[in-house]
Image (spheres, rainbow, N blue to C red):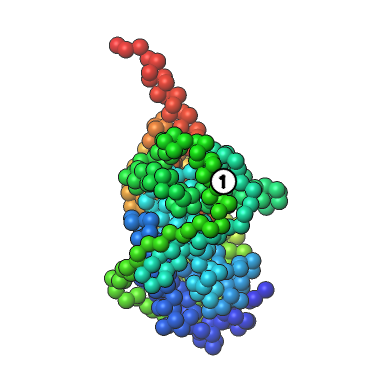
Amino acid sequence: MLAMSCTNGPPKCPVEGGAQWRELESDHFRLVTDLDAHVAESELHRFERSYDAMMQAAFPRGATGRMRLVVFRTNDELRAFAPNAAAGLFVDGWAMEDDETGTALFGSGLREESRAVFQHELAHRFLAAGFAEVPPWFSEGLAVYFETMRVEGDRVILGDWARPNTPLPSSIRRLTVLDRDGFYLGADRRDVSDEDASRVGLRYVASWHLVHLLRNGPDSIRNEFRRVVRTVNDGGAFEPAFDAFVQEVGAQELDRAFIAHSQDTERLSSVFAYTPTPLRARPKARDLSPEETHLLFAKLLIRGQAPHQALPEVDEALRHAPRSLNARLARAHVQLVRGDGQGATNAFAAIVAEAPANGAALAGMLHALLETQEAAPTGPDAERLRDLATRLSSVASTADEHSMAIVGLATTGDFERALLASEAAVRAHPTSFRLLAARAKLLAHEGRYRDATVAMRRALEVMPERRARGPEGRDLARRLADYRARAEQAEQAERAEPAH
């Protein structure tokens, strides 16, 4: 295992002879890398070109915010943070920053083997930003479809043969009726059986074949499916539009076309004319300090596969910048993540005393106090939490800070102010699944189940795939089903009431 300190092994601090780390910011990405400056800018251009080509091919609305990328000089450096990564992967975001989409890690830049990982995730981001709720088969099938997208001069080529021949369902309905739980089968669990994992893999393949049929199949099917796409692009619901499409084409005819298309190894790819969109400006670039470099390593480690190595990295950052507020905040946060609630509380309290309007410190302290509560707070404890939550709600800027303020207010029983805070927070961060889910829960508490259903549905739409497949995603899906059921019960009760 590689040590991540200034004195032991790669990657080293620049002051100890290691490569200089730098940050580049373009229209759609924030890239951090230890590649040489001119190589880094060239790599960033490759990411932007993929983004641009995908937009022109299928996603005219684009995605919100800038995607975070970390590109290592070598694959060995990547594996120091993610030992099992072959070409690239995504790790969860750092809670102290305004980032819920996570960070993409790649070794040696955007090469053939990592392009599929990047374009798959990017397709999910485009879907979340621009489409209404779509079922898992379409989300995953379209993401796999875009894995092989390539740009050749003035052409974008989509739909290359990407998946092997495998047993497929005889009827597409076996695939299209699956909800999230049924589709993913808890594939994130460590105890999932080999059989279940294989079944999930087959669903990805079948979904890709179906999407390929809808986009590259016979004209009669492609032309009818364009109506579904237009409906979804206009904000309509996917599933009713798709049901109407199946009825128009005919379920049996669609099943026959699906099997025939999946067995046709001569099928054609789609080719689109492509005119590159110039960047608005040359990427902004700056060198990271040794402190920032070690904090970067700590953030990747705490959310990756070696969280025990994060604290030494923060301490290295503090060695370079002993009074750094960011490093001190990071240290307190790492303590909290590692279960040292009391130590984190004391550290956050010291920072709050020095910087009473610092949102990250207030959020961290509130989080630490809530973690150490063994029962519903009362008396002075409740007052302390309510005061912190109130102060935080007035200065919160990131989604995490807003979320902690809402949780603090709700925990102390101030649901009215928590609901108002959630409304403002979602307005400021409309693609934060945590804030949308928190608002849904508060709306349900008020008995507003229709509104709770809308908020929770949107939370699942914008939730990253790796989270949607995990316990968090399944929990939100179950809550959505509960809100829907309660909304329907309320509607039935209203219809049953006699007119006055």
Q: Residues within 10 Å of mark 1 (few under 14, many from 20)?
A: some
Q: Which residue is mark 1?
A: 259
x then y, percent, for residue 259: 56, 46
**Residue drawn 58% across and 72% down?**
78
Q: Residue furthest bottom?
A: 17
Frontmost residue, 455 versus 229: 229
**Residue drawn 44% across and 81% down?**
39
For residue 301, say whether it is visible: yes
For residue 423, say whether it is visible: no
**Residue drawn 38% across and 59% down?**
57
**Residue drawn 51% across and 56% down?**
267
Frontmost residue, 48 versus 289: 48
Count of marks, rendered view: 1
Q: The C terminus is located in which quarter?
A: top left
Q: Amino acid at mark 1?
A: Ile
Above-or-below relation of 214 to 241: below
x then y, percent, for residue 146: 47, 59
Above-or-below relation of 311 to 463: below
Above-or-below relation of 340 to 450: below
Q: For numbered disc 1, what is the local secondary structure? A: helix
